[in-house]
């Protein structure tokens, strides 16, 4: 077998509109397609990633169970998106304008949460950001 890269990532979501707004308006991912159920309700929105796409898939009518604590859960840990090292300050400013707090950061990565609490990393690893200081918290 020879895997050639990531085709897409699918995320099961409770509420599509705020999730689409976050990934489209805050992170700048373009909407590629919308898919409806037979009853006409929105089932899935696909957002563009370089060389792949992110599929936000609406949960069914059943009530979702609460997510387990991140430290106790198995499964996906985060979605890491690449940013340019020279764009870190601009990305931070856009997050602040959108009132999306940076919950943790290292010299290479800023971590935020989407509206449903999923962890998203904005990373330029292994390249240092312009103006980065040695001794950056979290290293």
Image (spheres, rainbow, N blue to C red):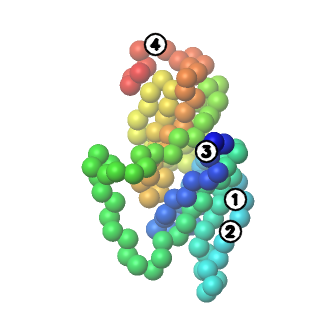
> What SS does tag 4 mark?
loop
Front-lying residue, 8 or 39: 8
Residue at horizontal 57%, vertical 62%?
A: 56
Q: Which residue is mark 1?
A: 31
Label whose residue precedes the other's in the sequence (2 or 3): 3
- What residue is pinned by disc 4? 134
Which residue is label 3 attached to?
A: 1
In the rendering, at what x and y percent does residue 30 appear? 70, 54
C-alpha distance separating marks 4 and 1: 38 Å
Is residue 30 shown to the viewer in this render? yes
- CB-based contact (under 8 Å), mark 1 and mark 2: yes
What is the quadrant of the N terminus in the image? top right
Q: Secondary structure at mark 3?
A: loop
Whichever of labels 4 and 2 marks the residue nearer the N terminus, that label is: 2
> Which numbered disc, 3 or 1, marks the residue that appears first in the sequence?
3
Helix, strand or loop status at disc 2: strand
| Sequence order check, earlier mark of 4 and 1 | 1
Give the residue displayed 41% in from the left and 46% down from the top: 77
Quadrant for residue 62, please give it. Answer: bottom left
Q: How far apart in space, not on screen, are marks 2 and 3 (Cα)?
A: 32 Å
Q: Marks 1 and 2, how far apart in space?
A: 8 Å
The image position of residue 37, as x and y in percent, is 61, 80
For numbered disc 1, what is the local secondary structure? strand
Q: Position of residue 28 (x, y in %)?
A: 66, 48
Dot label at residue 95 = none
Quadrant housing residue 10: bottom right
Q: Is residue 44 above or below residue 106?
A: below
Q: Residues within 10 Å of mark 4 (few under 14, many from 20)?
A: few
The residue lying at 53 percent from left, 70 percent from top is: 58
Q: Which residue is mark 2?
A: 34
């Amino acid at each position: 077998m020879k895997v050639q890269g990531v085709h897409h990532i699918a995320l099961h979501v409770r509420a599509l509109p705020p999730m689409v707004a976050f990934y489209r308006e805050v992170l700048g991912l373009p909407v590629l397609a919308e898919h409806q159920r037979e009853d006409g309700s929105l089932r899935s929105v696909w957002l563009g990633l370089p060389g792949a796409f992110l599929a936000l898939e609406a949960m069914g009518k059943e009530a979702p169970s609460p997510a387990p604590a991140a430290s106790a859960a198995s499964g996906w840990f985060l979605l890491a998106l690449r940013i340019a090292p020279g764009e870190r300050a601009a990305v931070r400013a856009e997050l602040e304008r959108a009132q999306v707090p940076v919950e943790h950061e290292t010299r290479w990565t800023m971590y935020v949460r989407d509206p449903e609490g999923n962890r998203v990393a904005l990373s330029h690893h292994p390249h240092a950001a312009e103006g980065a200081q040695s001794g950056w918290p979290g290293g």
